[in-house]
Image (tube, helix red, strand yellow):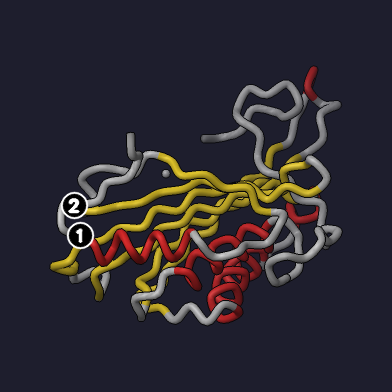
């Protein structure tokens, strides 16, 4: 049974998604389709992904592509990309006051790198620093970054925008920009995907 929400007759969007998912991606990316959300648009497609290097998950995220053939004023178009990017960074980032600007650069540079022209681009970057005390004081501090990004593709080809999202994941995971079909490269910072609350290896942290 399909996990997607394609409105009957929405062949153009269906074809755009099929072409998008047929493109080659960098080898560190592991992704899969997931059930698309309801009520946000007549048609929708969604996926989740992780950046994995040497069996270590460095970043994770989700992408939802919404399509309304009538268009929506807030989108300034008929298609809207809604992305989530998450990673756990080195403790040194706890004192990095410019982390939000760095996260924003991951977004803009990823779009530019893949020629993904967009409109109405917006991003919220959240940094969560977790420190443990008392009986949990031996646990290391953690720094989680979460980016919620949305934009409207300027053209009908969705592949560059899918690639841009994967590049955002790679950047958050500490990997430099790289074309598809290359060998994994050592991360530039020691990022890893955030662990779920209650995991024995992390302290409890605040919970879109």
For numbered disc 2, what is the local secondary structure? loop
Q: Is 80 on the left-hand or right-hand side of 141?
A: left
Residue beneath the point at 24% across and 53% down:
43
Residue beneath the point at 46% across and 48% down:
47
Task: State the residue position of label 1.
Answer: 10
Location of the N terminus by quadrant is top left
Residue beneath the point at 35% across and 39% down:
3
Q: Nearer the viewer, residue 89 or 75?
A: 75
Location of the C terminus by quadrant is top left
Q: Is residue 48 above or below residue 104?
A: above
Q: Position of residue 191 (x, y in %)?
A: 76, 50
Q: Nearer the viewer, residue 197 or 160?
A: 160
Task: State the residue position of label 2.
Answer: 7
Q: Position of residue 31 (x, y in %)?
A: 57, 47
Q: Position of residue 179 (x, y in %)?
A: 70, 72
Q: Gap in Å between the C-alphas at discs 2 and 1? A: 5 Å
Q: Is residue 116 above or below residue 2?
A: below
Q: Position of residue 82 (x, y in %)?
A: 40, 58
Q: Nearer the viewer, residue 53 or 103?
A: 53
Residue 24 occupies quadrant: bottom right
- Residue positioned most to the top: 135
- Dots 2 and 1: beta carbons under 8 Å? yes
């Amino acid at each position: 049974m399909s996990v997607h929400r394609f409105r009957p007759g929405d062949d153009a969007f269906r074809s755009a998604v099929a072409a998008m998912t047929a493109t080659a991606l960098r080898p560190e990316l592991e992704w899969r389709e997931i059930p698309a959300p309801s009520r946000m648009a007549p048609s929708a497609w969604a996926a989740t992904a992780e950046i994995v290097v040497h069996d270590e998950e460095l970043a994770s995220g989700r992408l939802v592509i919404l399509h309304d053939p009538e268009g929506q004023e807030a989108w300034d178009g008929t298609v809207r990309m809604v992305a989530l990017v998450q990673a756990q960074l080195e403790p040194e980032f706890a004192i990095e006051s410019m982390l939000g600007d760095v996260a924003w650069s991951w977004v803009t540079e990823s779009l530019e790198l893949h020629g993904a022209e967009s409109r109405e681009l917006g991003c919220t970057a959240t940094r969560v620093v977790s420190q443990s005390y008392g009986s949990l004081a031996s646990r290391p501090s953690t720094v989680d970054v979460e980016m919620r990004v949305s934009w409207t593709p300027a053209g009908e080809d969705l592949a560059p925008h899918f690639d841009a999202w994967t590049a955002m994941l790679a950047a958050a995971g500490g990997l430099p920009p790289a074309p598809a079909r290359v060998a994994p490269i050592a991360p530039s910072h020691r990022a890893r995907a955030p662990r779920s609350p209650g995991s024995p290896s992390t302290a409890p942290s605040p919970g879109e």
